[in-house]
Image (tube, rainbow, N blue to C red):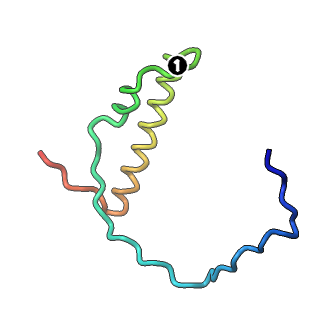
């Protein structure tokens, strides 16, 4: 078992310049709208909890809502990719 270190033996953290210029942000890429947002979760099978039907439905609703919010944000920022028909 490892012994706790003596606080006097620890080196103080190296100071960080919080006012430095950050690295430039990457270019913005358009957001595509998925066809089925819950496909990946469904492919994992039922959750391993009691009442799996209710849990699965709740998880799918949360994912669908999060997807709708993400699409709305992308639309408001004019970042939606063009639809391929």
Q: From the viewer's perspective, is residue 29 above or below residue 20?
A: above
* 11 displayed left or right of 83: right
Image position, residue 57 (x, y; %) = 47, 24
Q: Is residue 53 above or below residue 23?
A: above
- Within 10 angstroms of label 1, few (less than 14), some, or many (20 or more) residues? few
Q: Residue at x 86, y 65 (%)?
A: 7
Residue sitting nearer the eye, 35 or 3: 3
Which x, y percent locates residue 47?
Answer: 50, 22
The percent coordinates of residue 63 (x first, y second) are 44, 37
Q: List the single residue furthest toward the left.
A: 85
Q: Which residue has dot 1 on it?
A: 54
Dividing the picture into quadrants, the one containing residue 79 is bottom left
Asked whether, in this view, residue 80 is left or right of residue 73, the answer is left
- Indicate the secondary structure of the residue bearing disc 1: helix
Locate the C terminus and report the quarter of the image it occupies.
top left
Query: Which residue occupies the foreground of this view, 17 or 49?
Result: 17
Q: Nearer the viewer, residue 3 or 58?
A: 3
Tell me how many marks there are.
1
Q: Nearer the viewer, residue 42 or 35?
A: 42
- Specify whether 31 is left or right of 66: left
On the image, the x and y values in percent for residue 9 come to 84, 69
């Amino acid at each position: 078992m490892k012994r706790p270190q003596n606080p006097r033996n620890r080196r103080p953290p190296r100071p960080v310049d919080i006012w430095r210029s950050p690295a430039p942000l990457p270019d913005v890429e358009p957001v595509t709208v998925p066809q089925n947002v819950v496909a990946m979760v469904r492919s994992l099978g039922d959750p391993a909890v009691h009442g799996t039907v209710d849990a699965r439905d709740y998880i799918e609703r949360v994912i669908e809502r999060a997807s709708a919010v993400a699409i709305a944000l992308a639309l408001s920022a004019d970042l939606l990719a063009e639809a391929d028909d």
